[in-house]
Image: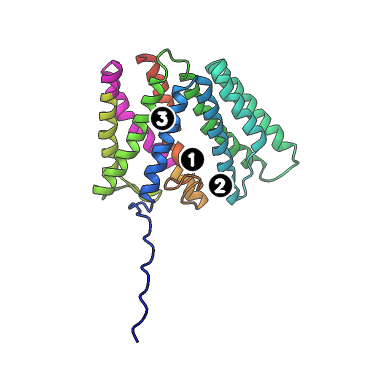
Amino acid sequence: MNPEPTQNPPAKPKKSRAGRNLPASIAVGVGLGVLALAMLLAPPVFFLVFIMVVAVMAEVEMATAVSRIKVKLCLPPLVVGSIGMLLCAYLLGPEGVWAALLATLIACAIWRLSSGPSKHATRDLLVTSFVAIYLPFLASFVVIMLHNPHHPAPIIVWIVITICNDIGGYAAGALKGKHPMAPAVSPAKSWEGFAGSVVMCTVAAAIAVWVTGTPLWAIGVLGVLTPIIATCGDLGESLIKRDLQLKDMGNLLPGHGGVMDRLDSLLITVPLFFLVSLGIF
């Protein structure tokens, strides 16, 4: 008696060398890009609200991540302060951001101390302060750029060149990566990948300069400094995740991880693009 034919097991999603679901990663990346572009082409207040929502989502994600090591973020005042910080950036500019940051830190301290004495109070406040600077404060530079006379060009250039850093680094690292930059922190990040990031960012910066008619010096500044700063941001977040014993900060974005896994390079590079935009736009 012949055995019954068996069904082939369902094909597993194709994964990259980094262990990512590549089709899902591409689809989510394209979707996020389309959403960001739609918000940028709408009236500026829409992009402001978009940044606020993303910042709050990232803060909740960070609160969940750090709870693994018994750190408790002062989340309610942090969220309220973050929205206020971004609103001040939109209405008052850089001076308003600094004032809102100070008010946020004071509110978080009062909130934490009102919970009573604890041997972890100082640690909780330090981590909360770090998140306040890392997320809404850096994101405020994007909001300020909404008032640039050439909006949305500066923000689009920032997003495209920073994404090109990730694409160039991934492609070169996957094909030729043999020499890790910081194996104890991120074994997958290689010097070959960094070289790919520099090449890709330089090409993207050259195209941006040609399209916008900005000075040629921007090619060198953005093409070289963007990969350096973005790589520091990537390694910094990898160090945090290693300390928390996490592969990803979250799982909201298939193929990417969490919100913070997409924001690490963008947040750390935005001050550079803000400063450059003052001179070229």
Q: Which label was assigned to residue 65?
A: 2
Tell which circle, 1 or 3, labels the residue nearer the N-terminal end: 1
> Label 1: how many residues lie within 10 Å, few (<14), some (14-19) or many (20+)?
many
Task: Please tell me which residue is depicted at 40% across the width and 15% down the height of the picture.
Answer: 150
Q: Mark 3 points at which residue?
A: 269
Above-or-below relation of 229 to 120: above
Tell me residue 118's x, y (percent). 71, 44
Q: Mark 1 points at which residue?
A: 260
Tell me residue 268's x, y (percent). 44, 32
- Cα separation, mark 1 vs mark 3, equals 14 Å
Question: Could you tell whether 29 is left or right of 48 in the image?
Answer: left
Q: In front here: 66 or 262?
A: 262
Residue 191 seen by the camera: no
Query: What amino acid is at disc 3?
Result: Thr
Above-or-below relation of 111 to 184: above
Tell me residue 237's x, y (percent). 46, 42
**Which stretch appears magenta?**
208-236
Query: What amino acid is at disc 2?
Result: Ala
Hey, which quadrant is residue 2 in on the image? bottom left
Query: What amino acid is at disc 1?
Result: Met
The figure's colour scheme reads rainbow
